[in-house]
Amino acid sequence: MIYLDNAATTKMKQCVLDEMMPYFTENFGNASAVYSLANKSKFALDKARDRVAALLNTRAERIFFTSGGSESDNWAIMQSVQMMSSKGRHIITTAIEHPAVVNTCRSLEEAGYEVTYLPVDQKGFVTADQVKQAIREDTVLVSVMFANNEIGTIEPIAAIGEVCQEKGVLFHTDAVQAFGQIPIDLSELKVDLLSASSHKIYGPKGVGILYLGPRASGIRSLIHGGSQERNKRAGTENIPAIVGFGKACEIAKETLSQRMQRERELRDYMKQKVLATIPHTTWHGSDGEDRLPGNLNFGFRFVEAESVLILLDQRGIAASSGSACTAGSIDPSHVLIAIGADEDEGRESIRLTLSDETTKEELDECALQLQEIVSMLRSGSLLYEDFLKQNA
């Protein structure tokens, strides 16, 4: 299997699993208890928190463990606006956010909040000036993703944070795709809340974090119950997963520069190869360093992504698209629509995302299979035939 869907999830590293294993069977104590077995779990919890904080260059007491990115996004948004409710009920986000942010905002709209969805340019960028112009007296929260999950665009988080702090508005960023893939230094960024997830960086599924900066430290729990996570997030801690997350963060910090350079080189190699060998192909997103190193997104005109993905899978290659399959129909990618694609183009995008194990040989094979598959699918397309005649 050639696995090129690492933005969806990554394969957990063996050394991460090895570090987790004792906490399933030997050191299984509840970290909230007082006996020595529990103290081992408490020590492991603190160590993992330190490792996560080190990757973000922040203080460990600002890191709160959750079940993953979606919970972190929900917590950040729902409880931030509640904390700031005396100021107003206006939220600002973008048109290309992950569903965990979009659908949380929609639920708040149903509850009477007003949400401004900022447009992006053809590369997927929103600007700090757009945010500044959209902020009103009753704005309580800005939520802009650090990097887009479909087209890899890295947003100007530093500049947006400056605007939000100047205007006295809380700033949340969904950093699930950027965390551990590019440098994030919270000592330099004016970010109040940040969401991240373990399984995007070769750690276990089912664990993430929410960073709460000084201005957001007063937000209340989303999940009520016990006093875990310093009374911020109830529920017995998933110590094995948290331990694995911490180990994955340690590895990510040690290997970040090397991985970025290697994945960027492979990404650019694959981009050039596909664009050179498959005609009428569109490259979605940015060309420069303001794109995630391992992200590629192509649109093959007159070919639905679903068909390409099925045929790739039959040939041993795992990839994905931005389109969502709902009740047998294919909805176009909301991200591609936001950057100017029409509905047909929104159903034609293929996302390839690399890992630290991806090889040039695997990409060569994928490019070859894509060339054959796209050619085969287009050969049966009357629309493509008409297009060729019109452009002859």
Image (cartoon, rainbow, N blue to C red):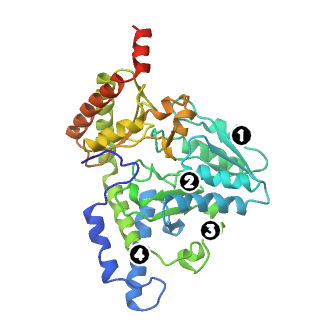
Q: Are the residues flagged by discs 3 and 4 in contact, CB closer than 8 Å?
A: no
Q: Which mark is residue 222?
A: 3
Task: First in sequence, mark 2 or 3: give its number.
Answer: 2
Provide the secondary structure element on which disc 2 rests. Answer: helix
Placement of 390 over or under 144, stated as above or below? above
Residue at screen point 49% across, 63% down: 209
Q: Is residue 391 visible?
A: no
Q: Which mark is residue 100?
A: 2
Q: Which mark is residue 239?
A: 4
Question: How much space separates mark 2 and mark 3, taking CA atoms?
Answer: 15 Å
Q: For mark 3, does the 10 Å Cα neighbourhood hold few (<14), some (14 to 19), or many (20 or more) residues?
A: some
Placement of 300 over or under 177, stated as above or below? above
Q: Are the residues flagged by discs 1 and 2 in contact, CB closer than 8 Å?
A: no
Task: First in sequence, mark 1 or 4: give its number.
Answer: 1
Q: Residue furthest bottom?
A: 35
Q: Position of residue 287 (x, y in %)?
A: 42, 30
Q: Nearer the viewer, mark 1 or mark 2?
A: 2
Q: Amino acid at mark 4?
A: Ile
Q: Amino acid at mark 1?
A: Ala
Q: Amino acid at mark 2?
A: Ala
Task: First in sequence, mark 4 or 2: give its number.
Answer: 2
Q: Which mark is residue 134?
A: 1
Q: Which mark is residue 278?
A: none
Question: How much space separates mark 1 and mark 3, taking CA atoms?
Answer: 28 Å
Residue at screen point 26% across, 70% down: 18
Q: Amino acid at mark 3?
A: Leu
Task: First in sequence, mark 1 or 2: give its number.
Answer: 2
Name the quarter where the C terminus is drawn: top left
Q: Nearer the viewer, mark 2 or mark 3?
A: 2
Q: Residue furthest top?
A: 392
